[in-house]
Amino acid sequence: MKGPSQMTRERRRGVLSIDEGTTGTRAAIVLDDGDTAPPAYLPISVRSSNHVRVEQDATEIWVNTVQVCRAALDWAAAHRVEVTGVSISTQRATVLLWDTVTGSPLSQAVVWQDRRYASRLRAWESEWDAYLVEHTGRPVGARAPLLWAAEEITRNEAVGRAHDQGRLAFGSVDTWLVWKLTGGARHVMSATNAVAVGAYDLRTGDWHEPWVEFLGCPRDVLPRIVDEDGDFGFTDPLVLGGRLPILSVMGDQHAAMIALGAHRPGQATCVHGTGTFLDAVAGDRPPTHRCQVPGVLTLVGWRSQGASMFSVEGYAATTGSAMRWLCEEIGLFESPSRLAELAREHTGPTRVRFLPALAGLRTPFWSPETTGILTGLSLSTTRAELARGILEGFAHSVCDLLEGVEKAMGQPVTDLFCGGGLAASDVLMSSQADLVGRPVQRARGHETASLRGTAYVGGVRAGLWPSVAAAVAGLPAGPVFEPTLSDTERQDARAAWRDLMTRHVTAAVGHGARPPGRGSRGPEPDSQEESTS
């Protein structure tokens, strides 16, 4: 029989980690060795009533979250794991309004891909862009969550009535989940989520009042901004069956940075999810952009104990979602995995080009109305060549983002770690290495990066690890993909891609997009204007 000391040694500790993505909710126990138990997962519906509106049901998000959390807690109980607390990572800049008395949403959740305000916001660019870039790290952009909230109060009777009665709350998905998990005890937003909403003051760490006031959003509906490991309260025992501290809350891309190993200035991550995000660590002060680049933003990488680490980010909104669209909506391939398999079969060059701009283009051109294109097809095009051309389009998009981030920072990225679902493709990783002209590392366990990253931050607070670096240190390194193209081949491929984009964006002028050139937010020889996602 085992003695008490032996039984104590066998009992492990872990963090219940929630990853609230755009298309799915997962939860898992992140264990004290840094690894992750099998996640529980449920999909989330995404609705688009037209080409600029993207919405979700906040109640579905909440119900799914509770289900996957309970499944993860059941796993912990069955495997004798002591759960020390809860950590959360969420999709950023998806927002909603709810009634604090009934606890019910008063609106659909407006997803970060939504572009319903893109045309209207352009009228403010000349007056506000330079000012906002300096103070908030991002210009006017294509979305305006606080403007949406202000207008909902005036045009939605239920929302307006709730505000008049002092029972209206606004927040992003992290705000909503924390409020529900704590039984309404906390109305807060983590810094990495607040900066994505677009009115975060990089220097004060609070809401930037001039922009909030201009957008007309009442201050009393806004959540308090806190550190990633700040005071998020405790879970209501009626929700998950126990009173657990909420240890940390982060935006999903920033959590992935932590887990994939980008901790020092110059290190960067490329995460392929619904969209592809490239984030580089910039240092403990907001970087002064050497060159303003369309779509490249200054963000808070993470904020802990009052100190911030900043990051620079560029993103392509529809890579993973374009893959799903090609397979599920259009039916060109049976599944994303089948597309990846076919791409391996085509080993030669391809004339197929796919620009995954299904929700507009941001970098290197600022053109929210631009659409995607699939070109270079002929009677000799095989499904395998088509699949490879699609993945190479994703790789070119990554190269666009990397070039933009490096230009904005005025220095090269020293290490590039990759993760996310699409990163499982060797073809995509090899294409990225070829087009950026340097090694690319696929991190181990990259599929659970957002789950693990926020849990590492929370686990440090709970005493599971002395530091985030210590949590990551025990994990094995992933494979490195080396470039195989010559400099001439790489430059020719990139030149052909830039020519394709320039012609496509120019052709879109008649549909509302502005052509490349001075004042258009497109690439110029010496300077570029910055825009937002």
Image: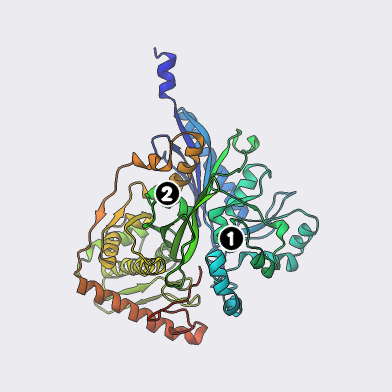
Q: Residue 287: image x %, image y %?
A: 46, 63
Q: Is residue 161 above or below residue 102?
A: below
Q: Name the residue under label 1.
A: 200
Q: What element carries label 2?
A: helix
> In the image, is 117 to the left or to the right of 425?
right
Q: Residue 239: image x %, image y %?
A: 62, 39
Residue 438 picture quarter: bottom left
Q: Is residue 234 above or below residue 135?
A: above
Q: Quick one: which residue is furthest to the right in this view?
A: 165
Q: What element carries label 1?
A: loop
What whole-number distance in Å separates the C-alpha atoms at marks 2 and 1? Answer: 21 Å
Q: Which amino acid does label 2 sit on?
A: Ile
Q: What residue type is labelled 1?
A: Tyr
Compare residues 6 and 269 and report the one nearer the observer: 269
Q: Look at discs 2 and 1 and give the one toward the viewer.
A: 1
Q: Mark 2 points at which residue?
A: 258
Q: In this view, does 463 lie above or below 228?
A: above
Q: Residue at x 40, y 18 (%)?
A: 6
Number of other residues with Cα within 10 Å of mark 1, as a class: few under 14, some 14 to 19, many 20 or more? many
Query: Could you say which disc has been placed on residue 412 in the image?
Result: none
Q: Residue at x 73, y 49 (%)?
A: 102
